[in-house]
Image: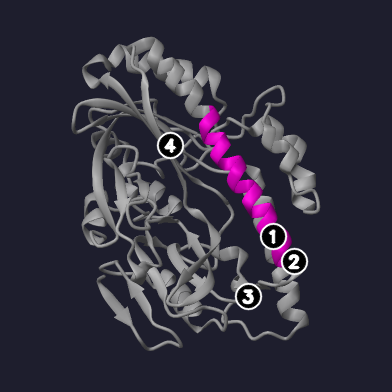
């Protein structure tokens, strides 16, 4: 831990050297919130979010705060270890892998032409209005990457073997669920004249029907997101095996935007992790870097001070617009040296989009060093080829 702020209703404990001003305002709002418990934890990848910083963890004994989970419910990472030596990943094969992955896995706003099969559809909580509304669309989104910071990568471990990694979430489900129940939470707080430090942190009582409905929808989105990553990995791994003749050893699938009932400091609480990964003692985790830097497979240390959590990635150093204003194509290309990737995307005005380039992110090795008491490094993985949404 780097520092503790004890000037609020409850302390703020941070693993960051510094916290930007906007994120600090949000952290203080959380610490002053009537429903938060014991302390607010900021992971070393912390940066400003909507209502609550990304890389933040809170616990609430009696409330659920939709914006403390966020809009990409179930966003997470799936890593697959193979027995294939990385020497087989020649540049020609990597470029062919990218081409074939692009042909099988829709990215960005694309989706499958036909509905996808999944036994989980039968468990959809149809009492939730956004689930009912989005269910048919989601049947064609299953097994699709999305955009933004989502990716599919081939990586090389320090032991010289090939891994594959996917970062993606619940697609439009998460957004629709988050917005719907945030509005319900705002209405409840307004009706009950609740004094909030920020309207973006409206909550639902944990024992209410509204909270139960939100949690059912959220848990379905978690299941959908986990299966979404599995479907994409099946395709990406099959393509890699055909090109490089490797077989699968194991998979690790974790999410980092959710809340769950856990016991901390002697109380049953709803732990909200927004851009944070569960890191109980020995628990496998994945902390990806940027598209040009290392990612890490870790084992949790079970720190009570972080509510058994660690970072979910490197964390942004620049906002998207700031990155596009300040970064050059030349420095971004230099940061991708040795990594096979497609050219930088263009926005609707035809300008290069550099918002996902490595210089827009914090130094992943500094982030890992800052949380040595939260997660133990098991394997370092360096990118060889990357597909972005």
Specify how the rendered protein is coloured: one colour
Q: Is 242 included in the stretch rendered in magenta?
A: no
Q: Disc 3 vs disc 4: Cβ atoms closer than 8 Å? A: no
Q: In the rendered image, which residue does mark 3 sit on?
A: 199
Q: Where is residue 383 in the image (x, y as percent from the top left)?
A: 29, 32
The residue beneath circle 4 is 352
Task: State the CA–CA distance, disc 3 to disc 2.
Answer: 18 Å
Give the number of the mark in front: 3 or 2.
2
Mark with earlier residue (3, 4): 3
Q: Which dot, 4 or 1, sits closer to the camera?
A: 1
Q: Quarter-wise, where is residue 109 in the image?
A: top right
Q: Is residue 229 left or right of residue 140?
A: left
Identity of the residue drawn at 51% across and 47% down: 75
Q: Is the magenta stretch mostly helix, strand or loop?
A: helix
Q: Earlier in the sequence, mark 1 or mark 3?
A: 3
Classify 356 as above or below 98: below
């Amino acid at each position: 831990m780097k520092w503790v702020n004890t000037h609020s209703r409850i302390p703020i404990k941070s693993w960051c050297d510094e916290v930007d001003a906007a994120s600090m305002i949000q952290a203080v709002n959380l610490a002053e919130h009537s429903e938060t418990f014991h302390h607010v934890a900021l992971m070393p990848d912390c940066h400003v979010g909507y209502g609550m910083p990304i890389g933040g963890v809170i616990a609430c004994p009696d409330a659920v705060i939709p914006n403390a989970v966020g809009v990409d419910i179930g966003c997470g990472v799936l890593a697959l270890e193979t027995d294939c030596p990385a020497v087989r990943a020649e540049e020609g094969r990597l470029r062919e892998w990218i081409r074939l992955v692009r042909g099988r896995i829709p990215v960005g706003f694309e989706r499958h032409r036909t509905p996808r099969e999944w036994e989980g559809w039968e468990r959809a909580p149809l009492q939730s209005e956004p689930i009912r509304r989005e269910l048919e669309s989601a049947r064609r989104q299953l097994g699709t990457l999305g955009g933004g910071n989502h990716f599919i990568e081939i990586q090389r471990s320090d032991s010289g073997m090939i891994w594959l990694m996917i970062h993606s979430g619940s697609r439009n489900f998460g957004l629709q669920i988050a917005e719907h129940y945030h509005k319900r939470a705002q209405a409840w707080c307004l009706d009950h004249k609740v004094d909030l430090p920020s309207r973006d942190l409206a909550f639902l009582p944990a024992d209410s029907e509204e909270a139960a409905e939100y949690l059912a929808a959220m848990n379905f989105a978690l299941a959908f997101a986990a299966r979404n990553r599995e479907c994409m990995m099946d395709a990406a791994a099959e393509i890699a095996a055909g090109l490089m003749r490797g077989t699968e050893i194991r998979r690790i699938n974790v999410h980092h935007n959710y809340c769950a009932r856990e016991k901390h400091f002697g109380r049953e609480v709803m732990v909200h992790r927004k851009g944070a990964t569960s890191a109980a003692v020995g628990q496998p985790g994945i902390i990806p870097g940027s598209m040009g830097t290392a990612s890490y497979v870790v084992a949790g240390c079970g720190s009570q001070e972080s509510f058994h959590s660690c970072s979910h990635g490197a964390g942004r150093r620049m906002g998207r617009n700031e990155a596009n204003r300040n970064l050059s194509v030349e420095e971004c290309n230099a940061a991708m040296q040795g990594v096979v990737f497609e050219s930088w995307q263009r926005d609707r005005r035809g300008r290069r989009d550099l918002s996902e380039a490595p210089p827009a992110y914090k130094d992943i090795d500094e982030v890992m060093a800052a949380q040595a008491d939260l997660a133990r490094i098991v394997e370092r993985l360096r990118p060889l080829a990357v597909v972005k949404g």
